[in-house]
Image (tube, helix red, strand yellow):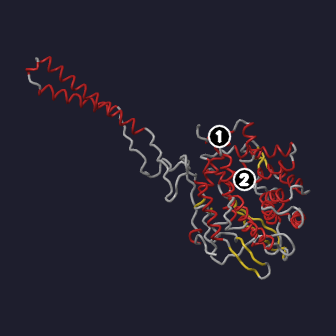
Amino acid sequence: MKHALSPQQLGRGPLRPTPPDGPTPSGPDDGTSRPIRSVGPLGGLGCAAAGYAVFQFLFEVLPASVGGEAAKYLIASVGGLGTALSAWFTAALLRARATAPAPRPLPQPTPGTVPPAGGHAPGPLPQLFAATYDTLVGEVSVVDDPERGRLVGWSHSLGESSPSRPTSVGTAYGLQTMLDLGTTDGRLSTGELADTLWRLRLPGGGWSARSQGARARPEVTALVLGALARAGASRGGRLAREVDLCTAAFTQDADRAGRESTHVMTTVLRGLLRAAPECDALPVLREALVEGAVSDPHRDRLRCWGYRLDSPHGRPSAVHTAQAVLALDRAARVLGESPEVRAAREDGVRWLLSCPDAPHHVCRDLENSREEVRRPRPDDPARHEVLNVRLFTASWVVRALLCGGSLEVARRDGREETWRELLDGAAACVRAGQRDGIWTWGRGESTELRCPMWMTYQGVSALRAHAVWTYRPDEAAPAR
């Protein structure tokens, strides 16, 4: 199919987040700023000088016939004083106008659009989502595979230079993006996308990333199962069989590297909570996640998470703490929660709220990161399979803070304003990372894929969740 955006357009460079309210004070003049005029003591002397000059002029030009020397002094003095006062008032008015804030320009309607009745124009989010959907429609790949049949989906990244072929990871994230966008025009069928995921299933069961070969991996299998469950797949039959295969392969003996990775553990937990909420493995996996928390001496010894659940854990990490908080919050709604698990989850929320940096839309806690998951290759244990993981930190922080349990902690601690500031800052960072509804991995890696499907899904998901939370119908309703 014809691409909506060229690889050159999609492979753009990194975007630097900017404050949501416009340029910083040190930036260039945008045409709306006002020149600053200072009227201080020197300005007052100027007013007096102007008044004295008028006095001298009038005293010299007035004829003696006006009533004598006293009358000339009186008329000249009144004229000079009036001139000085007028000059002073004029300078004060200029100073007041110069220091007043410039009015915000009125939003201009997009050419070709008509504001709806009542004067309420649509916000930017529908336009962003429409651009995302149009690009995904233009980038979808349709392949008639002689063995697997018709495949409809996406590769790992948009705008790949070589002919793209649907992959399990790209199609799973694309399906979840479609579900978040809620589009119903029929150009893309979620049923076809789900069928493609089943066709991409490995012969022995499960799914793997393109770089992982023909052996199923729990994190990819759980991702696909969660997407299929969201799309309406029945929990019985083949979905249940795939859940059993996934949990059997995700043990300490079978996949030690995966069990020790915070990213892998939380990915499996989230996928299984969607696909099999009654799965016996869920409490065990949650317990392993809680035991992998660490205490941070720099933030009141609050528990948080690094990239590993076993020693060495790595330094405390906002993205891994957010992933753990999100997984534990969802597990609490499905499984309930013990006091120990609740305490660990709430510590993670407090750790996120204790970010010492500002402003929050560009703070260090929101910096993207990357890591590797190294596993021994099944055909040659002396060599390793390497899974490169990139983490869109701001989107994870938004979703973690929007958990109901996170807001409860903030309110209980009297830190709701801090929670709101962090949330709005993280959401602004997410918005700044996209262009035309597509997110770009901006780390300057010229040989890497630049517009991964997972990043656009996470950006859309975070902004949608934030928009739902900020919706206030009672406040927006017009007075009757």
Mark 2 lies on residue: 317
Q: Is residue 101 above or below residue 224?
A: above
Q: Residues within 10 Å of mark 2 (few under 14, many from 20)?
A: many
Question: Would residue 301 appear left or right of 130 to someone viewing this image?
Answer: right
**Residue 218's quadrant in the figure?**
bottom right
**Rounded to the nearest whole Å, what is the CA distance between mark 2 and mark 1?**
38 Å
Whole-percent x and y of residue 185?
66, 64
Q: Is residue 293 above or below residue 376?
A: above
Closest to the observer: 379 or 473? 473
Q: Quadrant of the N terminus?
A: bottom right
Closest to the observer: 389 or 460? 460
Q: Residue furthest right?
A: 280
Q: How many marks?
A: 2
Residue 52's label in the rendered image is none
Question: Would residue 133 appear left or right of 203 to someone viewing this image?
Answer: left
Q: Are marks 2 and 1 in contact (CB under 8 Å)?
A: no
Amino acid at pointer 2: Ser
Q: Is residue 254 visible?
A: no
Closest to the observer: 49 or 246? 246
Mark 1 lies on residue: 474
**Residue 10's quadrant in the figure?**
bottom right
Q: Quadrant of the C terminus?
A: top right
Whole-percent x and y of residue 137?
65, 68
Q: Nearer the viewer, mark 2 or mark 1?
A: 1
Residue at 84%, 69% (x, y): give it. 206
Amino acid at pointer 1: Asp
Closest to the observer: 110 or 302? 110
